[in-house]
Amino acid sequence: MVSFRLSNKTASPSIKLLVDDPIVVNPGEAITLVCVTTGGEPAPSLTWVRSFGTLPEKTVLNGGTLTIPAITSDDAGTYSCIANNNVGNPAKKSTNIIVRALKKGRFWITPDPYHKDDNIQIGREVKISCQVEAVPSEELTFSWFKNGRPLRSSERMVITQTDPDVSPGTTNLDIIDLKFTDFGTYTCVASLKGGGISDISIDVNISSSTVPPNLTVPQEKSPLVTREGDTIELQCQVTGKPKPIILWSRADKEVAMPDGSMQMESYDGTLRIVNVSREMSGMYRCQTSQYNGFNVKPREALVQLIVQYPPAVEPAFLEIRQGQDRSVTMSCRVLRAYPIRVLTYEWRLGNKLLRTGQFDSQEYTEYPVKSLSNENYGVYNCSIINEAGAGRCSFLVTGKAYAPEFYYDTYNPVWQNRHRVYSYSLQWTQMNPDAVDRIVAYRLGIRQAGQQRWWEQEIKINGNIQKGELITYNLTELIKPEAYEVRLTPLTKFGEGDSTIRVIKYSAPVNPHLREFHCGFEDGNICLFTQDDTDNFDWTKQSTATRNTKYTPNTGPNADRSGSKEGFYMYIETSRPRLEGEKARLLSPVFSIAPKNPYGPTNTAYCFSFFYHMYGQHIGVLNVYLRLKGQTTIENPLWSSSGNKGQRWNEAHVNIYPITSFQLIFEGIRGPGIEGDIAIDDVSIAEGECAKQDLATKNSVDGAVGILVHIWLFPVIVLISILSPRR
């Protein structure tokens, strides 16, 4: 983030360069570019960038000054200075650096263009052309010499320079009416006016032996047979004087040459290819270029390259799991091979030769095993062979059982939670149990995390395991809060199968276990009860010993349910500013239950009980609701009571039949006045239905609504259970 003070002087940046444009330098020279600010408030920052690519590694930057100690041709390009102060648009000034260079000196000889003869002849015209690549092109100059003596343009020796737009960097020497005295060595010298660069000198010999080129391919060099991965040389013999550059390309398809270009140059007519691949098979064209030779119709020849490669087969590797006394057939297929004729195959088990043969018209070979036994298990190799080598299919035939797959959605895996130890319900399924022989047992290994030693035991399995069947084993006497690695290995009559390892970690249950839940609101987190955010006011944790001395008399309890003045309970304070009808809602933790077996008995019943205190002439209503998982807005009324019940604690019992995770909600509603405090204590949930005498004798008169509610709710829950997905 950039900040500055805005004033009447604030202005966008402006700059100038203290250098020429363009800048022409010789290689190796040091160059300095200077950029200065001419305006801008606040003061702008200056940076240098290059139009293409990054700045050279050796660049030295100092504010607006850029220095390149020893410049090279690779450093040429456009350099820009940018000024920015976050006011308006950045300012930018650029200059172009040109590094002098001369390279690629070439020549060609053009016989008399008015005759169709490709040879040079006495009495006819001949043209010698020289070409170089020059930077900058406007500084390029040429000088001509004959046998070392300077030449000047004359009527018979005409020196010209080709239009740069047509053929840049080219000079021509036209010899009109060639004579014997014109034979000799002609030299063109290219140089740059600025100096600092070595000249390029090109010699061209004109004599009676100067003849156009010819191309031939040695008889034994086409077709040329090689093997994949070898290094090969394709040859075209070139004759003539001078010998031109030879261009190689693919003749049978429009694909790149081995170096990635469409044409490769050769000065001796040889094309060398390293690490030949099968894709390089085909026809190659060699042809003369005009460079360093005659500017005549190109001569060309063709060379055929044949690349032999071993058979490509499938599958390269396949694991086959099969039980004893069962049959198995392995098949190895040829995809590609050259040469494809005289293909042979051999099957081996380890080092033991099983079968050999020769392909006729089929593209595959098979090897069957009618009845597997211990001797038949192992690695089978099928080798398919031609002149270039062999392709191999490998088959691992084994009776090993697949790995078990741990089930990570186990309901309440910490199923026993004692003071210092815990027990864990480990569940898994078996991958492809029918693929091999029956699993007779599992070897269970367990070790404390970070330890080396495994403790092992076997878990016997009776009968066949079905695909998807959930297997359970209880791990007991695990020490809190240690984590453990568990390794499970299936065993068949073949032996050990593949193992699976997982880590189990102890974590105190966030949701209490129903068999153990009892809350007297004595602990600091009030048994994970929470306040509802949608109500008007909150329930309060209180004891008689800690209550406000200005409490409202004639309402509320004088002790907790056990009679202790130090014991805690939850209550609603109905003093002002509370108004009639306002609600306070207290939410229990979410209780998880085991998924119901769709083929088993009806849903598990739970006895929900609590003590409540409703004393005062302005007592309102106490409601209890059951919220099932997934029902975020619909709450089922479970129990309700209203009005003054006297200065005593009353007990309520209600049967509930949840089909999924659930929550209990206590709702206190303020009555018409301040003497309407309501309290609850000792909330319990126990597995199994409530005792009949509890339901009959311990509920208040209004509490009988709870019995009716659960009788009404039961068929609804059963209907929901039927409609719910089965696991």
Image: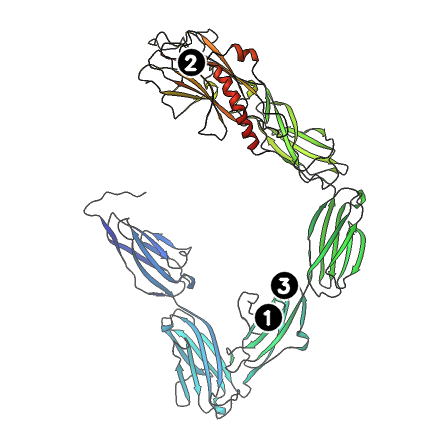
Amino acid under label 3?
Ser
Q: CA distance from mark 3 to mark 1?
A: 15 Å
Task: Please give the label number shown on residue 679.
Answer: 2
Q: Nearer the viewer, mark 3 or mark 1?
A: 3
- Residue at x-position 65% and y-position 26%: 474
Query: Which residue is disc 3 drawn over?
Result: 277
Q: Position of residue 196 (x, y in %)?
A: 39, 69
Comparing 635 with 558, the one in front is 635
Q: Mark 1 and mark 2 in contact? Answer it, CB < 8 Å.
A: no
Amino acid under label 1?
Leu
Q: Position of residue 310 (x, y in %)?
A: 70, 61
Query: Which residue is disc 1 drawn over?
Result: 271
**Vertical side of 8 occupied by 411: above or below:** above
Q: CA distance from mark 1 to mark 2?
A: 100 Å
Amino acid under label 2?
Ala
In the rendered view, does 238 fall on the left or right side of 545?
A: right
- Residue at x-position 38% and y-position 26%: 534
Mark 1, Cα crowd under 10 Å, few <14 / some 14-19 / many 20+, is many
Comparing 487 with 222, the one in front is 487
> Label 2's element?
strand
Task: Please give the label number shown on residue 227.
Answer: none
Sequence order check: which comes first, mark 2 or mark 3?
3
